[in-house]
Image (cartoon, rainbow, N blue to C red):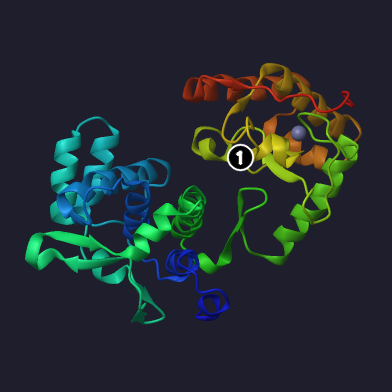
């Protein structure tokens, strides 16, 4: 566990070690990390628990909305219902802040710096709750906030959080859940599943003729800098709003620029023309009696009309959640 620290003990890596390797019995640490990374602490290094409480609790609420179980035994009752009621519009910012002040911090302040059973030597804040109901930020945190990687670190917190909450939902150890950074997908670690994903890449690539699904730029499925992302056509972030998000019917290979470059897709819903393209792709597998076709039938419908309407329904439902549609910049001639 400490190897990670010894390789490159930069302030960023100490932070990463805490977030990625520390114990996670509940989501409080992620919420605190999120609040620290997103805050503006230019004026004072003494941050009142009062001030931290709202961004902290909002971060928790956002995750509760996507994954209600936020701990191996869940959040404490007061916080859980505060987050749920906040999401339902029944609790105001001010009420949420007050509840989080009283019930949200528990032992997260003490536990934040613990790694492998002991506190790390260069903490990101000092506990001054007794003296002033506050924490005092250290230079280590300011160094971190000043780095160009600040946004990456925030994304990493979120990614790790998603891994851990998937594990909580499934009732398994977080070590069994993988977040594939390249693809932004989560999978339960099992020999079969990973193998399936690899062979499914090769199959998808066959249909896509070695080109990005969206912009037709050349892609590779070998690992390397040009390696394609397995992309969820309908975004994984909205997975609770439609069935079988990880199903093959919803997976395509995309170049990194389309998936996560400037102007990239990220969590957007693709344009309706692209939906048509996805339907054609899925029908290709069905009509060619490819074994993926059977899976697509099982996941989206027995007839072409049913499958088309399945896609249209998902498109309509998710459009309500996202409003904007995304179109790629073409990087090569259309190829399918
Ligand atoms: Zn592309």
Q: Percent position (x, y) of residue 48?
A: 16, 53
**107 relative position to 121: left or right:** left
Question: Against 20, is 283 above or below?
Answer: above
Question: Dot 1, how many residues are within 10 Å of its Cα: few (below 14), some (14-19), or many (20+)?
Answer: many
Question: Ligand 1 shows up in which quadrant of the image?
Answer: top right
- Mark 1 close to ligand 1, CB under 8 Å: no
Q: Measuring 29% from the left and 64% from the top, which residue is drawn there? A: 138
Element type where label 1 sits in the image? loop
Q: Measuring 83% from the left and 30% from the top, which residue is drawn there? A: 216
Question: Against 205, is 222 above or below?
Answer: below
Q: Disc 1 designates what residue?
A: 245
> Which quadrant would residue 121 be assigned to in this image?
bottom left
Q: Please identify the residue farthest to the left as the structure is shown.
A: 131
Kindly tell me whether residue 250 is visible in this rendering. Answer: no
**211 relative position to 21: left or right:** right
**18 relative position to 108: left or right:** right
Q: How many marks?
A: 1
Kindly tell me whether residue 158 is visible in this rendering. Answer: yes
Q: Percent position (x, y) of residue 91?
A: 19, 35
In this view, the residue in front, 64 or 219, is: 219
In this view, the residue in front, 269 or 1, is: 1
Q: Percent position (x, y) of residue 11?
A: 45, 67
> Which quadrant would residue 234 be assigned to in this image?
top right
Question: Against 319, is 268 above or below?
Answer: below
Q: Percent position (x, y) of residue 145?
A: 40, 54
In this view, the residue in front, 132 or 180, is: 132
Q: Quadrant of the C terminus?
A: top right
């Amino acid at each position: 566990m400490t190897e990670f620290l010894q390789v490159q003990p930069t302030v960023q890596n100490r932070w990463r070690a805490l977030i990625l390797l520390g114990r996670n019995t509940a989501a409080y640490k992620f919420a605190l990390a999120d609040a620290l990374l997103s805050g503006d602490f230019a004026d004072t290094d003494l941050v009142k628990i009062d001030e931290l409480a709202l961004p902290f609790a909002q971060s928790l609420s956002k995750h509760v909305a996507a994954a209600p179980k936020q701990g191996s035994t869940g959040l404490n009752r007061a916080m859980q219902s505060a987050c749920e009621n906040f999401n339902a519009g029944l609790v105001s910012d001010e009420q949420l802040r007050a509840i989080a002040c009283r019930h949200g911090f528990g032992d997260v302040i003490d536990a934040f710096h613990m790694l492998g059973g002991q506190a790390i030597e260069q903490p990101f804040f000092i506990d001054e709750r007794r003296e002033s109901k506050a924490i005092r930020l250290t230079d280590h945190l300011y160094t971190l906030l000043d780095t160009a990687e600040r946004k990456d670190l925030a994304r990493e917190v979120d990614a790790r959080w998603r891994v851990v909450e998937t594990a909580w939902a499934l009732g398994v150890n977080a070590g069994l859940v993988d977040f594939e950074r390249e693809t932004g997908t989560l999978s339960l670690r099992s020999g079969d599943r990973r193998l399936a994903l690899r062979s499914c890449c090769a199959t998808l690539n066959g249909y896509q003729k070695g080109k990005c699904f969206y912009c037709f730029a050349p892609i590779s499925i070998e690992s390397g800098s040009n390696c394609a992302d397995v992309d969820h056509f309908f975004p994984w972030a909205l997975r609770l709003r439609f069935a079988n998000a990880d199903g093959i019917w919803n997976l395509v290979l995309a170049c990194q620029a389309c998936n996560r470059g400037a102007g990239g897709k990220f969590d957007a819903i693709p344009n309706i023309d692209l939906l048509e393209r996805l339907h054609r792709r899925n029908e290709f597998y069905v009509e060619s009696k490819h074994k993926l076709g059977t899976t697509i039938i099982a996941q989206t419908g027995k007839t072409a009309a049913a499958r088309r309407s399945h896609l249209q329904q998902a498109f309509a439902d998710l459009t309500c959640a996202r409003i904007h549609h995304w179109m790629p910049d073409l990087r090569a001639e259309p190829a399918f």
